Image (cartoon, rainbow, N blue to C red):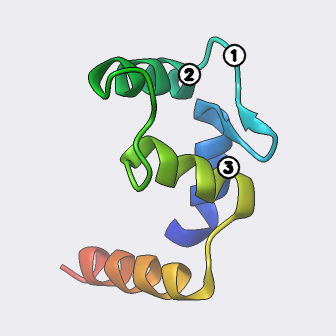
């Protein structure tokens, strides 16, 4: 359930398959990141990673990792 929720949640906050949606939480995050980094969003940053997942989806290894983490958290 956790893994399946990731793409829709990212899309809802503005990390879409076509880029960051205007006036969204993602756009605000991108702006703050760019200001903090002297005008650009750093490669490998949280914003860059979330946009990558929003655009391309999760890799199989990411799905396994998130599924394992979710299972471990709910088992407690």
- Quarter of the picture holding the N terminus: bottom right
Q: Secondary structure at mark 3?
A: helix
Query: Farthest residue in the left direction?
Result: 76
Q: Quadrant of residue 5?
A: bottom right
Q: Residue at x 43, y 76 (%)?
A: 66
On screen, residue 41 versus residue 74, left or right, reads right
- Quarter of the picture holding the C terminus: bottom left
* Res. 1 visible in picture: no
Q: Residue at x 68, y 41 (%)?
A: 11
Residue under pointer 1:
22
Q: Position of residue 49 (x, y in %)?
A: 49, 54
For the residues bearing labels 3 and 1, Cβ distance under 8 angstroms: no
Residue under pointer 3:
8
Q: Residue at x 52, y 88 (%)?
A: 61
The residues tagged by marks 3 and 1 sit, at their Cα atoms, a distance apart of: 17 Å
Sequence order check, earlier mark of 3 and 1: 3
On screen, residue 37 versus residue 61, left or right, reads left
Q: Which mark is residue 27?
A: 2
The residues tagged by marks 2 and 3 sit, at their Cα atoms, a distance apart of: 17 Å
Q: Position of residue 9 (x, y in %)?
A: 59, 45
The residues tagged by marks 1 and 2 sit, at their Cα atoms, a distance apart of: 6 Å
For the residues bearing labels 2 and 3, Cβ distance under 8 angstroms: no
């Amino acid at each position: 359930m956790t893994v399946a929720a990731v793409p829709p949640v990212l899309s809802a906050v503005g990390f879409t398959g076509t880029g960051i949606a205007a006036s969204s939480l993602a756009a605000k995050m991108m702006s703050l990141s760019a200001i903090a980094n002297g005008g650009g969003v750093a490669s490998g940053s949280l914003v860059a990673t979330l946009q990558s997942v929003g655009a391309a989806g999760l890799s199989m290894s990411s799905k396994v990792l998130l599924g394992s983490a979710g299972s471990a958290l709910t088992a407690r």
